[in-house]
Amino acid sequence: MISKALNEFCLVLMLIFAPSLLLAKPAILINFNGRVDVSVNETADWQPAVIRMKIDEGGSIKTYENSGALILMPNKTRIWMRENSALEIEQKKTLSSRLNFLFGKLKIRVPHLLRGELFKVRTPAAVCAVRGTEFAISLGEEGKTDIYVLYGEVKMRYNIPPPSGNEEILLPQGHAFHIEEMGKEGVHKIMTRAEELAGIENWNPGLNEKERREPIKRKETERMKMRQFAKSTRQTNKNISSFAYKVKESDLEAGRTLKDIHGNLVRVDQRLMRPDGKTLQFFNLVKRPVYNYSTPNIGEKFEYKGNQGITNRLDLMQINMVFNQDIPERMEEWAGFFDKGAVKAEKAAFIAANRTDPDNIFFVAEYYLRDESRDELVNNARVIFPDMTLAQSYSDDADRDVLITGIVNKDDFLKIANVDSSISGFRIEDNNDANGSIREKNGAKIGGAVWGIKISPGSLTDLRGSEILTNSNVYWEKDKTGDDRLYNFQADAYRVGGVTAAGVLGTSNDVFWLTKENYGITNSGSLANTSDFTDTGKDPFSLMKEHAVESIVHVKNDASGSDTRTSICTSDYSPDGVSHNGENNNIDLVLIPDLPVAAVQRMLPAVDKLSN
C-alpha cells in the first residue's frame, strides 16, 4: 500500500500464487512391506522400493503378493495399497491432485481440502472427486469397480456413461457403488457391516490381524457422527448455494486471530466486495480488545506518543480500484477478463485509518488516476487538482507523490474514502487557499485534513532558510546491513500544499514526515527472519498461513534540522490545529495474505481448465 515494504510484500504474494508456479513437493513412500517396485517419474525404470523414496508426477507404485505400501501426498493425503495393486500419480499440483488407479485395492484418506482444492482418483470405469473423505476402491478386470465411502462424501462420474441413469452419482458415508463392467450402469447401495469393518481396519503395511482390527471400536463413535454429517450435507450445500447467489459469487471473506509485534491479541478480517459493476473494494480490518505499543528493541524507530491500554482499537486498510468495464460476477471468469488488453484501471485509492474514535479518524490516503500517455495509474498533483492538464502535471514540481492526511469525523472520512465509478475523479480537491487544505468537490472545506507533495531532493530552496534540500534530509531509511530480520523503517518528507494548479512551486513552507515501521511477524507475534522462508521445506500456502505483515504509520512534525534522523520530530503533525487525543496517534495495521490465497483457490480450477 502506502509503504514500500507493503508493495514488495504484495508483489511476492503475486509471484508465489501465480498458477505456473504452483507445483507441489513429491509424494513420499513412507512405509511398505514385502516386494514393492517404484518408478519415480514418467521416464524412470522400475526399481525396488526404499523407505522415504520420493515419487514425482508421472511416477508409479506396484505391490506384489503378501505386500503393501503407504504413500504420503504433498497435501497430507494418505494412500494405502494392498497386495497386487498398481497406482500412477498423474498430477501433483498444490491445489490439484489426480491419481490413476490401475488395479488392486486402495484406501485413501484425504484431509479437509482448501477451498478450490481438487483431489481425484481415476479408474478405467469412473472418476472419483473427494474432499475431507476416507474411502476404499477395489479394481478388477474389465473395469469392475467397487467404491466404499467410509467417511465424508465421494462424487463419482462415469468415464463411459451408461445408456440410462445419471452420469454423476453422489455417494455419502456408509454407501457403496459397484460397477460390473465399463459402460454399464452400476448399483448404488448401503455398505454391509463386513464391508464397513474391512474399510475401517488399520491398513498399515506389515500388521497382524489383531493389530489391523484395533481401530474398529474407536472408529465406531466417529463413524456415527460422520453419518449424521453426510445426511445434512445436501441441505448445507443448498443453503450455501442460496447464500452465494444473494451476495454474488465474486465476494470473498477471510480472517485470522493472532498476536501483533507488541504482543496484543489481534483479529484480522478481510473482505472483497463490489460496490458497483466496475469497482473492486478490498478491506483489511484490524481489531484489538486492548492496544499497547511495545515494539522490539531494534533502535532508531519512531517515537510513539499515544496512550497505552486503549480498548476496542480498530484500524483499517482500504483499497478501491475502478475499471473501465463491468467486472464479471463469477470470480472464475476474472483471469480471462483481466487478461484482455482493453480492460484498464481508471482510478484507485489506497487508504489507511485509525477508526477507534469515529469522530476523530486519523488517516493517510493516496489517490491514483490513469495517465493514457504513460499507460498506467499515476499519483501526482493531478489527483488533487481536477482541472490540471497532463502537461502541467508533468512539471518537476507537480509530478511527485501526493499524500492526504489528517484527523476528520466519520462523515468527512466517507467523502475521502468513497471512491467508485459514479463520478469522474474523486470527491475531494484542493481548497484553493494556498495552505494545502481540502474541500468536498465544488463544496465546503473539510477541516482537520491537508494534502502534501513529496519533496524531491535538490528541488526546493528557501524551505529551511537558504539551503537546497538533498536526499540526506528529505528521506530516511534504517541501515540494515547484516541484519536478516524482516523489518524496515523509513520516512519521507512532504511539503504541505507544495504546488499550484498550474504545476509550479507553491508558497507554503510547512513540512510533515510520513514514517513507517514494517515488520514480518509470525502468528505468535515474534519477528520473522529471512531463514523462516528460505530454510524450510514447507509449501508457500503453509508459510503464508503462519506469517503476516505489520505496518505502523505516523505523521510527524519536521524539526528543520540538517540531519535526517533528527529532522523528524517526536511530536505528531496536527493539520489545521487538530491535536491527537492519544488514541488516534498512529495507524497500526496487521495484513494477512489469506484473502489473496482464497481468491487464487477460487480461480485456480478455471485456470487449470483453460490450460488443459
Image (cartoon, grey):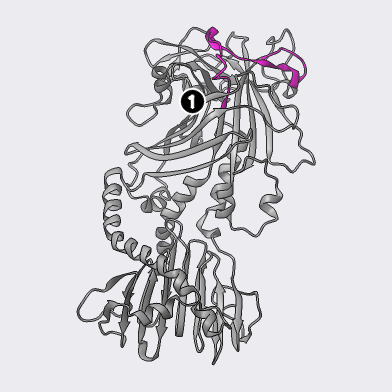
**Residue 445 sits above or below residue 595 on the image:** above
- Quarter of the image for the C terminus: give it: bottom left
Q: Is residue 397 visible?
A: no
Q: Which residues are magenta?
A: 558-587
Relative to 109, say whether 124 is above or below.
Answer: below
Q: Per the image, is 572 magenta?
A: yes
Residue displayed at 65% across by 24% down: 492
Residue behind mark 1: 390
Other residues around mark 1 within 10 Å, as few (<14) / some (14–19) / many (≥20): some
Helix, strand or loop under label 1: helix
Q: Position of residue 571 (x, y in %)?
A: 65, 14
Q: Dividing the picture into quarters, in which one does residue 298 lie? A: top right
Please state if 236 lies on the left or on the right of 440 as rendered.
left
Q: Position of residue 243 (x, y in %)?
A: 29, 47
Q: Nearer the viewer, residue 420 or 573?
A: 573
Q: Look at label 1 and name its amino acid.
A: Leu
Say which residue appears at 37% left-offset and 39% top-offset.
273
**x and y percent of residue 305 in the render?**
64, 18
280, 268: nearer the viewer:
268
* Viewer-side residue, 592 vs 226: 226
Can I make out residue 493 in this image?
yes
Q: Quadrant of the N terminus?
A: top right
The residue located at (57%, 27%) in the rendering is 291
Does the magenta portion include 456?
no
Residue 191, position as x, y percentages in the image: 32, 78
Q: Quadrant of residue 223?
A: bottom left
